[in-house]
Amino acid sequence: MLFHVRMDVRIPLDLDPDVRAELVARERAYSQELQRSGAWPHIWRIVGEYSNFSVFDVAGNDELHELLSGLPLFPYMDIHVTPLATHPSDVNA
Amino acid sequence: MLFHVRMDVRIPLDLDPDVRAELVARERAYSQELQRSGAWPHIWRIVGEYSNFSVFDVAGNDELHELLSGLPLFPYMDIHVTPLATHPSDVNA
Amino acid sequence: MLFHVRMDVRIPLDLDPDVRAELVARERAYSQELQRSGAWPHIWRIVGEYSNFSVFDVAGNDELHELLSGLPLFPYMDIHVTPLATHPSDVNA
Amino acid sequence: MLFHVRMDVRIPLDLDPDVRAELVARERAYSQELQRSGAWPHIWRIVGEYSNFSVFDVAGNDELHELLSGLPLFPYMDIHVTPLATHPSDVNA
Amino acid sequence: MLFHVRMDVRIPLDLDPDVRAELVARERAYSQELQRSGAWPHIWRIVGEYSNFSVFDVAGNDELHELLSGLPLFPYMDIHVTPLATHPSDVNA
Amino acid sequence: MLFHVRMDVRIPLDLDPDVRAELVARERAYSQELQRSGAWPHIWRIVGEYSNFSVFDVAGNDELHELLSGLPLFPYMDIHVTPLATHPSDVNA
Amino acid sequence: MLFHVRMDVRIPLDLDPDVRAELVARERAYSQELQRSGAWPHIWRIVGEYSNFSVFDVAGNDELHELLSGLPLFPYMDIHVTPLATHPSDVNA
Amino acid sequence: MLFHVRMDVRIPLDLDPDVRAELVARERAYSQELQRSGAWPHIWRIVGEYSNFSVFDVAGNDELHELLSGLPLFPYMDIHVTPLATHPSDVNA
Amino acid sequence: MLFHVRMDVRIPLDLDPDVRAELVARERAYSQELQRSGAWPHIWRIVGEYSNFSVFDVAGNDELHELLSGLPLFPYMDIHVTPLATHPSDVNA
Amino acid sequence: MLFHVRMDVRIPLDLDPDVRAELVARERAYSQELQRSGAWPHIWRIVGEYSNFSVFDVAGNDELHELLSGLPLFPYMDIHVTPLATHPSDVNA
């Protein structure tokens, strides 16, 4: 089932640049693995912000929390989740 | 280019039921035509609300405003648009 | 899976009293049927407000939206849904 | 009597990891003791956040404040309390 | 136990003046009866607003909701309740 | 005349514990002296928060600001003041 | 003593024009009488809004509430009051 | 001098269509006259909303309020004004 | 022309006390010079807060920004400006 | 196509003054280059704030994000983007 997720990244400005680079690289790998698995079908950058709108496709709430809390940047993000249902006008549903 | 759109429908409770039914039917037809044309690739119901999250794929801002302001329910909706860019971790980009 | 739901009831003050009474009676019957089925395990009144905090236990997002949008008072309520996961300290989990 | 409590944990990112681990372990033990005593009948993780919705069952306001202010993570949390009453449609009331 | 209550009165401007006067008179009598009984020890007007801050002294949450939802103006008010505990510096506690 | 005051205490987590203890002790003494003088007739803890609702009884705005800005914890608090008037239904007025 | 007051006027669009004109004329006369008496030393229009920022000079909270609640437009306004004290840098204080 | 203005139009849905059409036509003529005079150098539609961001170039605050309060749609709009100064990096300043 | 300004001072708690004292002294001298020149006709303390409401009388937006950004405490303040126009009921206008 | 952008600068108060000066100088050069290229046709200072309202003229969302995220002060700013369309009353459209 689908969930809409907004992620706002707030990495402290004084974080060690190497630590930061390593975190961002791990985040990217983690995200791409989930995208390839089908669990994270959409990710878009919000223009002008260090933020994204994403859509997750998971078996349920527990799996979603496990995936999100496992994000390497999880301690540095504000995350807001909205459950999605099929829209009655969706031509693909 | 892509835009994220949230639509919250606020049809007055005392609207004539026939007028309402006709409006909702026209909205559905209008939405499905845009979905089939490729301009409205995603529409999801927000669980528990008379609202949707949508993604539009248009040539630019003027086309998007034309499509949104042409919605039969436009006078009865609060709409908020967020421009989207390609995410650097997107495996499909 | 579990969802936390806040419902704020806003019935227009000038609604016909008989219509209102009938709506409230149908809402009560609908709620109690779902409570008995196990889909709506908790409902609490928020002190001083015509509002409730509820917990729903459903198969997923689509079922939850179907149950909520079927509420007789759905057109008269503001509803906000929050997905819940098992808490790692929950002694009953 | 019942109270709805939302807790948002904000542990500083630069807290010593051992101090943090010890705090989290003490929080868990404290919470589980209250859960087993019946004073904290429900605790749910909010999906995607380091937050929980809980329900407390206590003799009154003073006991609730004593329990909450005694949480090992109390200095690191935003807490919001809402008093709950029996809902007139509750089939278990 | 004590609760802090804010009440904001929103009587529709087009309510029949006799109905309004009768409601306000019943509200006053109801409030004064509770004040005399000891359940409503404080009521203050917020300067410049049709609102009050009050303190209630009741046996618990259910009694408080019963008293508040019985207010003649209850359908015309926004009410927000905050539970109070003894302050450790209170010289009268 | 009476004023409603909300105080939210935000002492930095890394403040020296001795400095903190001394500040809190001075705050307590200062508050109790004002309570005994009649200038601070009510102080209640907000359940679950390091905050209080208070009522002050002073000659006017300048005296109130002098008392509040003299609080030992003043630099560590968010304070919001609301002027109160006699309520027309107050049985003690 | 001085109070800062913001008033936002919300006269219903469908109010009878004669009733409206009479209300506005009475408001003007009432305001000018208080200005001349010294109780309402400043009134400024907020550019682009049907709103004003005002300063009142009154003996205390009860007098201020009496003046504000007596405004002919009081039922049609949102009013917010902030108590003012002498500023330590004020060259006229 | 320049001012940034946001206008949100809220024409009641049940306004007579002829009255509405006449209001909108007068608004358009009024706006275009000010644009041609140089007092209203920029007007942009906010995509998806019945709103605009505008820039006004006027002699001062009183002139701006006179122009805005003279808008035929003024009673039907929420307007927010922000004063602008020359930016130190502006290549045209 | 007149502008309403709210200033909220947020000096970091760990700023060196001498630096702080020197800043506050310079702010006071700067403010009093502007008050004496007629550019800053009103300044009031907001009761209970390290904040003020002020009125400035300047030739225009650029002068106002120059004066405000020159405040010694400017880097430590949140400032919000509202342009004022003559009120039609002002007896002194 | 046009976009409205609000930028609020939040440079930490304890940033090294040389680093800060160098950042601000690079920001200025970057901004002026974009202004001269036509991509950043308007920039205005918000009076009293370290903030600006700007208008960008770009080929689309991806270009805008590239320009904004390349700002030397990007890590120190809150940015909010609003897409603009041609206004039907614009005399220059």
Image: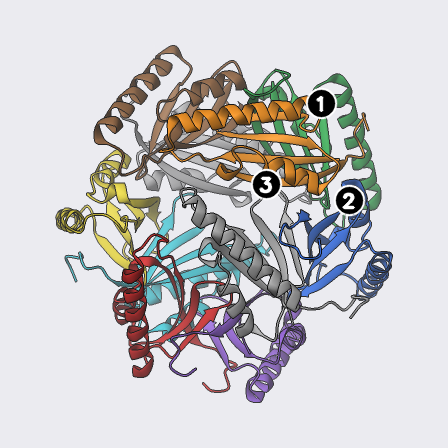
Chain colours: A orange, B green, C blue, E purple, F red, G cyan, I yellow, J brown
Which residue is painted at 48% across and 62% down in the image?
G73
Q: Name the residue under label 1.
A: B41
Q: Mark 2 points at which residue?
A: C65
* Residue G29 image position (x, y, % from top left): 39, 63
| Chain where mark 1 sits | B
The residues tagged by marks 1 and 3 sit, at their Cα atoms, a distance apart of: 23 Å
The residues tagged by marks 3 and 2 sit, at their Cα atoms, a distance apart of: 19 Å
Front residue of A91 and B76? A91
Quarter of the figure with the C terminus of chain G: bottom left
* C63 relative to I93 in the view: left or right: right
Please, what secondary structure does the residue beneath circle 1 have?
loop
Quarter of the figure with the N terminus of chain G: bottom left
Q: Mark 3 points at which residue?
A: A80
Is residue E71 depicted above or below J7 in this figure?
below
Is residue J10 depicted above or below B12 in this figure?
above
When asked about the image quadrant of residue G2, the answer is bottom left
* Residue B66 image position (x, y, % from top left): 64, 23
The residues tagged by marks 2 and 1 sit, at their Cα atoms, a distance apart of: 22 Å
* Residue E43 image position (x, y, % from top left): 50, 77
| Chain where mark 2 sits | C
Q: Are marks 2 and 1 on the same chain?
A: no
Residue type (three-letter) at the residue carrying disc 2: His
Residue type (three-letter) at the residue carrying disc 1: Pro
Inspect this view and state whether residue F11 appears: yes
